[in-house]
Image (spheres, helix red, strand yellow):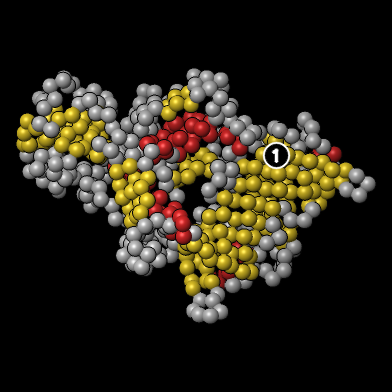
Amino acid sequence: MTQEEYNVSLQPTRVLHTKIIVKNYDFSDFGNLEGVVVGFPSFTIDSESNIRRTCSISLVPTTQTFEIKSSSAIWLDKYIQVYVGIEDIVTKEPIYTNMGIYLIDNPERVYSATDNTLSFKLVDLMSKLTGMRNGYLEGMSYIIPAGSNVRKAMIATITDTEFGFDKYDIDECPYEVPQDINISSGGTAYDILSQLLNIADNYEMYFDVDGVFHYHKIPMNANEGEIVAYHNFWNNVLINYNVSTDFESVKNIVEVYGQTHTIANYSDAFIDITGTTLWLNLPQITAYTDGLLVGFTTPNDIQINKTYFLAINELGGRSIIDDKGNYPTYQPNTYYVCKYVANGDYFRFLGHITPYAIAQENNVASPFYVGGSIGKIRIVLQGDNYDNLYTDLQCQDCAEYELYKRCLIQNSITITCVPIYWLDVNDLIEVTLPNKYGQDETMICLVKSINTSDTQTISLMNVSTYIIIEDFLDIDSTNIVQNKVITQEFNKVYELLG
């Protein structure tokens, strides 16, 4: 969003322009579609949908390039980039906003004595990976091995020559692939990406308006981004609003259970606790091998806030480190699981034999406060996709995100306004909701979905109050190893190309 786009959004009158650019599959320009737009183009942006952006346009054509046939502008091998412009009342020049790059879906040409229009729906570039337009993998099974790097596997998937995407902004996932991802023949690239996405529940993936693939953490509160529009902005464009709460979906305590580990190497017999080393007696283990799973029950005299190394038989002590680079702490008489990582020569702390976490709303200012009038409303999540959770930390992230979805997100606000074309989902805005019977309420909200035609409907979530997470993991969140980065390179991170 530029200052010019912001300024023209506040004009008392508007003259709209639509610019449609046709692009080849290599993103080079093919040409423009020339014609008169009938009515208002409609746009949807939904942060919860795999196809995030869609568009519908009807035109009265003025050139032959509108024929639906091979080599024309309206064909399977073309992208459509749409711009909507508001004419500056001073300069008389349109200020354009990029509304996205799309694939053409269901074009329809209507010609009669009274009608000559071309109508088509547009879907964003994810449709090229889901199977809606393309995305089916070559007729063989695919595997991403356990231990693979999520970012590298995503890059390998979208940049496959079959799909041709080479622009991406992909963050590192805090976790590695917990178990083999197997995609049978007939699967799609999106099947791979969605399973990688499920490894960290509070992350999202999408294509932006410039055709760049993104993988990021989802904003969850008011301090995780910049506010793009303050309350005085909406005074000029707001038409109406409503606030609703889905009582049935509200939960203020979330417990999450992951996949129970199968442990062949378990010991509750310690040779000794010498200084900072836990010495396990496991005669069957003669060497530390990559992926070695070890289970043990801590003795009653273990010190909760002390950092320990793990040693098996006489093989020597190794560091125990969790997925966030921290040294974990322990509770007495508790079963824990570790996994040896050869590239790094340390034990990865997985947590309990069945990974577990709990999150609850402890903010006294929240209407869903566990100590408030509604009391405790609990949900326990396990099985199905939760079996992808391999560590306590993964369960913790999942519990926090599920609390976010089942608590704050249920307190939803819908506003109707004059279209703000530069607004996007997951933008933060400050809005004041007028109250004719009491004091107006100003809040910071996260944009969840946008539907635009002659007016715009925006679904918002109030994030003014923070969720305070209280978890019961045996991990000391203050005991963080500063500047400690653990990198793991794998000889074969993925097998995507057969």
187 over 122 or under it: above or below: above
* Quadrant showing the N terminus: bottom right
Q: Residue at x 79, y 41 (%)?
A: 108
Q: Which residue is mark 1?
A: 105
Residue 294 appears in view: yes
Query: Toward the viewer: 149 or 88?
Result: 149
Element type at mark 1: strand
Q: Residue at x 36, y 57 (%)?
A: 377
- Residue found at the far right of this picture: 113
Q: Is residue 493 above or below residue 170?
A: above
72 left or right of 145 in image: right
Q: Residues within 10 Å of mark 1 (few under 14, many from 20)?
A: many
Q: Residue flagged by tag 1: what amino acid is it? A: Asp
> In x, y percent, where is residue 365?
36, 68
Image height of 459 relative to 57, above or below? below
* Left or right position of 104 against 118: left
Q: Is residue 419 left or right of residue 428?
A: right
Residue 252: which quarter of the image? bottom left
State the image coordinates of residue 313 (x, y, percent, origin top left): 11, 25
Could you tell me which residue is drawn at 69 percent across and 53 percent down? 42
Give the mark count: 1
**Quadrant in which residue 284 is drawn:** top left
Q: Position of residue 285 (x, y in %)?
A: 17, 21
Is residue 23 something that shows in the picture? no
Q: Position of residue 432 (x, y in %)?
A: 52, 71
Question: Residue at point 11% right, 36% down?
Answer: 277
